[in-house]
Amino acid sequence: MKWSLLELKKYQETPLMFEETLDLKSQLIKRDGQIIDLSPVKVKGLMSVDKQGYLLHYQVETTMTLPSTRSLTPVAIPFDFSVDEHFMTPEQFQRRDEMIVEEEVLIVEGQTISLDESVADNLLLAIPLQVLTEEEKQGSAMPSGNDWAVLSEEDFANQKEAQAQQVDPRLAKLSELFTESDDDNA
């Protein structure tokens, strides 16, 4: 869904209300290969127009399927968040008040504002770094295989400490030499 800037000028008195269901699955899978599936995205919000720009506020609801970061098992993650974005034309950006400098402003390229692009960008930004199945969240077992295992940081530190305390059997006789020479000097 796109709005032309000319069309939006009609809504300077009252905001433009919208409620859409967007199909962004193929677009998002192209942009991020880890996405397995995406349900239709429900978007509800408003666009407010004034001399300082275009304010877009909307609520996003959808479910995205991603691989678990631990076992690669598909995990369905529900998304429900709101977005506020401030768009300006290059001319408005040049004339902006110094008060707006602290706020992030998106410059409109061309003569349209695209809701699809905004929603897609914000969905990609909302993807969590760690995706776990319910079993992985509940249990502490890490995946392992032949000659490999995933360790937590704590387990790794404990393993490294145990290795440091363990004496190499080839050097065990050498350590006895030091204890004998200490006894002789006493």
Image (spheres, grey):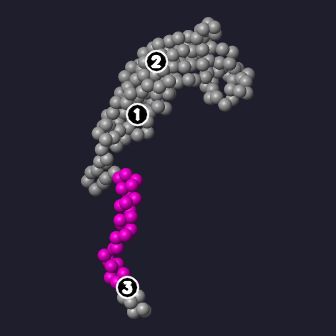
Q: Amino acid at mark 1?
A: Gly
Q: Can you give x and y, in whole percent of width and height, for residue 10 in the image?
A: 62, 7
Q: CA distance from mark 2 to mark 3?
A: 76 Å
Whichever of labels 2 and 3 marks the residue nearer the N terminus, that label is 2
Label 1's element?
loop
- The residue beneath circle 3 is 179
Q: Nearer the viewer, residue 138 or 171?
A: 138
- The residue beneath circle 1 is 33
In front: label 1 or label 3: 3
Which residue lies at the image location 73% right of the left edge and 24% below the top edge? 97
Examine the structure image and report whether residue 171 is included in the region drawn in magenta. yes
- The residue beneath circle 2 is 43
Q: Count residues near mark 1 (Cα–Cα under 10 Å), then give few for <14, some for 14-19, many for 20+.
A: few
Q: Amino acid at mark 2?
A: Val
Q: Count residues near mark 3 (Cα–Cα under 10 Å), then give few for <14, some for 14-19, many for 20+.
A: few
Q: Can you give x and y, in whole percent of width and height, for residue 158 in the image?
A: 37, 60
Whichever of labels 1 and 3 marks the residue nearer the N terminus, that label is 1
Which residue lies at the image location 43% right of the left edge and 92% below the top edge? 185
Q: Which residues are drawn in magenta?
A: 151-179
